[in-house]
Image: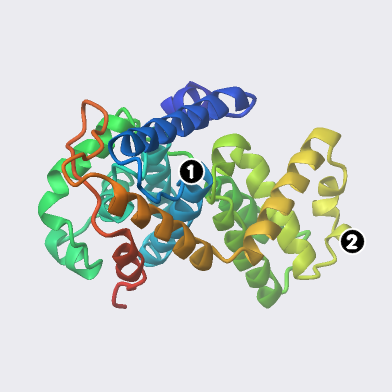
Amino acid sequence: MLEHSTQYINWCFVNKEKDLENLKQQKITKYRKIYQKVLNKNPQAEIQLFGIDDENVILNFYVSQLVQTCQSFPLKVEAAAISYFKRFFLKTTLLSHDPKKYLFPCVYLALKTEEIHIDNFEHLARQFRDPFFAQFPDTEQDILKVINFDLKIYNPYTPLLSLLERLKEDEKIKWDLEKFNRVYNESIKITRICFYDYLVFEVPHGLISLAAFLIALKRTEVEWQSMPALADFANLNDDVRAEVERVQLFVEKYEVFGIKEEAIKALKKLKNYHSQKPKDDFVKPEKHHHPNPPSDPQNALANAEKKPPA
């Protein structure tokens, strides 16, 4: 089913790493052209180069905000909202789009796609303290056009939850409930980290869920090798083992990575760009977008940190 989906065709870069690198290179080229344009108009500008690494740091910060925002919804809503957000900014830049403007629309699109009923749309927006509520219709259309209306989302939570449920019901495994819950929670935590950067675009979701489960077993000190039903997990082929190790290294990196601290540094660079840019020279987005210039990105960090009320 996945192999015939728009997600696989348009947004999955497994064995298509060059395509993802080409998209990133296009973004780098866009950034260089934008900065050169600013310098041509203002040669004395003391401008700090803002690049794709800075963009990733800021996007990862907002992904963490989407996780907080979606805590009261099913995991599939969280996965869809993050996927829409990351797809949108894979095709656009932070120099022409304020990321916090797209948080709530991505969540709302995810709720509709996953058929989660919301009684009061405006009340939901107020809960999330969305300062761009009046622009919501245009913003939603921007997202849909950029992601080409590819709304069906497959995510690594689905195979993970299926695996955990199957193992929980397996009578051959005498789970201690408290230990199983620890494995469950740790697996979800690890899978969630895999939404940073573009790992979920590059690694098959089944391998991400398998890696999350195996890492969780190790961390919770479950003696799974002695459980016959789990014996197959000890006999992974070299390719699978390599992907599991890749996921583990990625997770370990972002568990110690100061996302908020790095985002503050990157946001300062972004603010520097907007302060040096000629006031009448807004970067024009792609033709199908509305030219909505970003608001002060430093304030974006403060506003994004406000959690929705319980």
For the C terminus, the quadrant is bottom left
Asked if residue 115 shows in the view, the reply is: no
Q: Residue 222's image quarter?
A: bottom right
Q: Mark 2 falls on what kind of element?
A: helix
Query: Mark 2 = which residue?
Result: 226
Mark whose residue sits in front, 2 or 1: 1
Amino acid on which the number 1 mark rests in the picture = Gly
Is 170 on the left-hand or right-hand side of 146? right
Comes first in the chain, label 2 or label 1: 1
Residue, x 62% and y 59% (percent of image)? 254
Residue 21: mark? none
Is residue 100 left or right of 205 when viewed as pictured? left
Question: What kind of element bears circle 1?
Answer: loop
- Say which residue appears at 41% left-offset and 60% top-offset: 268
Location of residue 54 with respect to 25 vertically, above or below? below
At 41% from the left and 38% from the top, the residue drawn is: 87
Q: Measured along the vertical axis of the image, is residue 236 above or below residue 116?
A: above
Residue 94 appears at what percent x and percent y?
36, 45
As drawn, the label of residue 51 is 1
Q: Amino acid at mark 2?
A: Ser
7, above or below 89, in the image: above
Q: Quadrant of residue 41?
A: top left
Q: Position of residue 250 (x, y in %)?
A: 68, 51
